[in-house]
Image: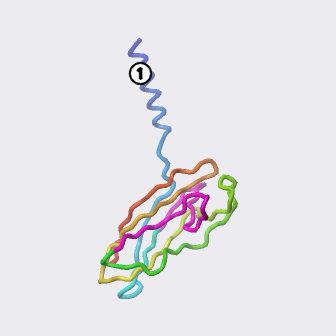
Amino acid sequence: MKTTFSLILALCLMKISAHSQILKPVTWSYAAKKTSPSTATVFIRATVEEGWHLYSQFIKEGGPVKTTFSFPSSNAYSLIGVTAEPKAVAKYEPSFKMEVSYFERSVIFQQKIRLKGKTASVQGSVEFMVCNDKQCLPPEQVNFSIPIK
């Protein structure tokens, strides 16, 4: 009897764990291109699964967590301006009771930098939040390192 109960419990737990997979609807990729001997542009691409959307950097207070890029200061480079993004979809979202801007499928963010030498490795992180029509995932932070040669 104990063995049968243990076997049934183990099978139930395996079934639950098989269905409770971690959702990761965004993948990030990175590239850089020198634009002159002393400048470069860093490209940060988010690929978003169908049905999900990633929020813009420009969301008003009271809405979802906006996408935020952080670049610690470096002796190898300095930032030129702020991180640029293409035009986002703007739509009223009843769950936040406001108009929000977001991206679907993919988006490429760009950051211009001034090099202080011939090469550099741009370090940073991106904090972001994604939602679909049923749920929002908690904000996530991803670190990156982008070499410039």
Which residue is depicted at the point 69% across and 56% down?
97
Measured from the top left, where is residue 1 in percent x and y? 41, 11
Q: Is residue 60 above or below residue 80?
A: above
Q: Closest to the observer: 93 or 53?
A: 93
Query: In the image, is 147 to the left or to the right of 23?
Result: left
Q: Indicate the position of residue 76 as horizontal and vertical percent values.
A: 31, 78
Mark 1, residue position: 7
Q: Is residue 45 above or below residue 82?
A: above
Residue under the point 43% across and 17% down: 5
Stretch in magenta: 45-73
**Image height of 17 relative to 54, above or below:** above
Question: What residue is rendered at 58% in x and 54% in y?
Answer: 131
User: Residue 53's quadrant in the figure?
Assistant: bottom right
Q: Under tag 1, what secondary structure?
A: helix
Residue extending farthest to the top is 1
Q: Is residue 11 shown in magenta?
A: no
Left or right: residue 73 compared with residue 24? left
Instruction: State how the image is colored.
Output: rainbow
The image quadrant that residue 88 belongs to is bottom right
Q: Which SS does the magenta portion mostly show?
A: loop
Question: Which corner quadrant holds the C terminus?
Answer: bottom left
- Amino acid type assigned to the residue bearing label 1 in the image: Leu
Place of residue 48 in the rendered image (x, y in percent of width and height, measured from the top left): 53, 59
Q: Quadrant of residue 52?
A: bottom right
Pointer 1 local density, CA inside 10 Å: few below 14, some 14–19, many at least 20: few
Q: Please provide percent x and percent y for residue 69.
A: 46, 67
